């Protein structure tokens, strides 16, 4: 096949991307979404944006998270953000030529409101705020441009309380109720319990509070709670178990006990920055590949595959082949799986290739061990914190009730952050951050 990017006919090259864009309209692009196309970078999502959008559909909720992840680093410095429409669809797991659902989802995000309540310094005044999840959205020429109100952008960028939402996990969910409950449970995983929610609150979080059908607990349990718990335990990094509290003969409250999902691979979840730390990633970026595309290629094809295409590009350059666009060559080589067109490698080339392979293997082992060590250290820290929190709670529970009240009042006076005081008012020691502070307080 002829290669317009080189002066040799051995290796094919990609067609000029600009010409392809002029020939195709965004609506005609068909997105194919392989199983492993998303980076591991987690999104820190403000509770205000989690606890008020229960009525969003699955696609709308996923879209909200993807757009926030894309804009996060520039939330306070840019009023408008942009993402390639094809990249957006890949991250959503959306495989369709029809842009109508995407338009409807953007329209919904511009109409759904997020509310927040923050306790003031005097513990009496409460900052109440409301904003649409998106201030505007525009689809044009294969790009999606969108923005947030300045007030909401500040809350999203500086989340006093947040949940980390992994994009690769989000992509696996098929139920809007499952994704909504996952978001609401995930931030409590270090204390292993959501605390008790009354059923009215739970219905609101699931977006079924306006349905008479779900007012009966048997319907809520059969159609929402059981299938949602089953899906979360099957596809996510946590396992949850519902517990119920009765008031007379009726179920009045629900909580979820949260544990780690031990069935998932050790490094499959929450490995932020692991791809970016690899040698292959650095080589791709140095060759002009965007950060997001480099992450996507490595995640989808693996380090060895991408390294082989980089080596092929280097060998073509060394042999004198004129490559007018390194990024274009790499894109075509990775997409079409280019091979070296020579009859076969010489013994010297085989030796060099073996040495490169061994070096890559050693580097991969080093990086894997480093990631594993970091993961184990984080888990050890979490276990230590949970032990301290449990000891502090046990110590408090052993005190007479009147003394417990006085101790908690004294502890509340030590809280120096607005969000901590607000969490204490709302959830007492069921709040992760408050419970950790209380453990420190008891130690002192």
Image (tube, helix red, strand yellow):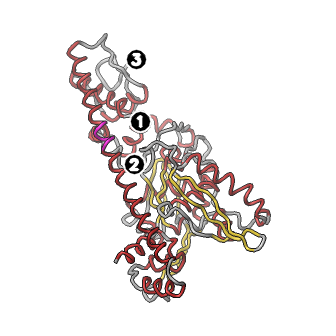
Residue tagged 2: 271
Q: Is residue 105 above or below residue 77?
A: above
* Residue sitting nearer the eye, 368 or 404: 404
Earlier sequence position, callout 1 versus callout 2: 1
Earlier sequence position, callout 3 versus callout 1: 3
Please provide percent x and percent y for residue 381: 37, 59
Mark seen at residue 17: 1
Helix, strand or loop at disc 1?
helix
Crowding around mark 1 (Cα neighbors within 10 Å: few <14, some 14 to 19, many 20+) is few
Residue 220 visible here: yes
**Is 371 placed left or right of 117 in the picture?**
left
Image quadrant containing the C terminus: bottom left
Q: Is residue 241 above or below residue 124?
A: above
Q: What stretch of residues is rendered in magenta? A: 364-369
State the CA–CA distance, disc 1 to disc 2.
32 Å
For image coordinates 26% across by 40% down, the residue present is: 286
Q: Based on the picture, tell me whether residue 155 belongs to the magenta stretch.
A: no
Crowding around mark 2 (Cα neighbors within 10 Å: few <14, some 14 to 19, many 20+) is some
């Amino acid at each position: 096949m002829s290669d317009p990017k080189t002066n040799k006919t051995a290796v094919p090259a990609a067609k000029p991307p600009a010409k392809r864009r002029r020939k195709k309209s965004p609506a005609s692009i068909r997105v194919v979404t392989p199983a492993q196309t998303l980076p591991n970078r987690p999104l820190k999502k403000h509770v205000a944006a989690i606890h008020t959008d229960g009525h969003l559909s699955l696609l709308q909720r996923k879209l909200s998270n993807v757009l926030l992840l894309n804009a996060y680093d520039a939330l306070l410095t840019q009023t408008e953000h942009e993402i390639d429409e094809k990249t957006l669809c890949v991250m959503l797991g959306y495989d369709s030529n029809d842009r109508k659902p995407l338009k409807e989802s953007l329209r919904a995000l511009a109409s759904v409101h997020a509310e927040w309540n923050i306790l003031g310094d005097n513990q009496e005044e409460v900052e109440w705020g409301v904003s649409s999840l998106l201030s505007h959205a525009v689809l044009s020429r294969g790009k999606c441009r969108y923005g947030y109100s300045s007030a909401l952008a500040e809350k999203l960028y500086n989340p006093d309380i947040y949940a980390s939402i992994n994009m690769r996990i989000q992509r696996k969910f098929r139920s809007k109720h499952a994704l909504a409950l996952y978001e609401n449970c995930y931030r409590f995983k270090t204390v292993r319990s959501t605390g008790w929610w009354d059923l009215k609150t739970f219905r609101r979080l699931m977006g079924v509070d306006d349905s008479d059908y779900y007012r009966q607990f048997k319907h809520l349990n059969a159609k929402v709670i059981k299938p949602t718990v089953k899906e979360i335990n099957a596809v996510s990094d946590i396992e949850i178990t519902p517990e119920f509290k009765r008031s007379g003969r009726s179920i009045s409250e629900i909580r979820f006990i949260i544990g780690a999902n031990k069935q998932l691979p050790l490094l499959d979840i929450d490995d932020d920055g692991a791809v970016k730390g690899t040698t292959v990633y650095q080589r791709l970026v140095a060759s002009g590949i965007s950060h997001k595309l480099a992450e996507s290629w490595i995640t989808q094809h693996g380090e060895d595959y991408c390294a082989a295409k980089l080596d092929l590009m280097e060998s073509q350059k060394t042999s004198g082949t004129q490559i007018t666009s390194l990024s274009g060559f790499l894109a075509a080589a990775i997409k079409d799986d280019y091979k070296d067109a020579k009859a076969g490698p010489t013994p010297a080339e085989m030796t060099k290739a073996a040495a490169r392979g061994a070096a890559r293997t050693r580097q991969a082992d080093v990086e894997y061990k480093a990631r594993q060590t970091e993961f184990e250290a984080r888990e050890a820290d979490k276990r230590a914190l949970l032990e301290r929190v449990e000891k502090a709670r046990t110590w408090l529970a052993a005190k007479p009730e009147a003394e417990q009240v006085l101790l908690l009042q004294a502890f509340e006076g030590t809280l120096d952050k607005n969000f901590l005081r607000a969490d204490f008012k709302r959830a007492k020691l069921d709040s992760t951050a408050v419970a950790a502070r209380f453990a420190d307080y008891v130690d002192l």
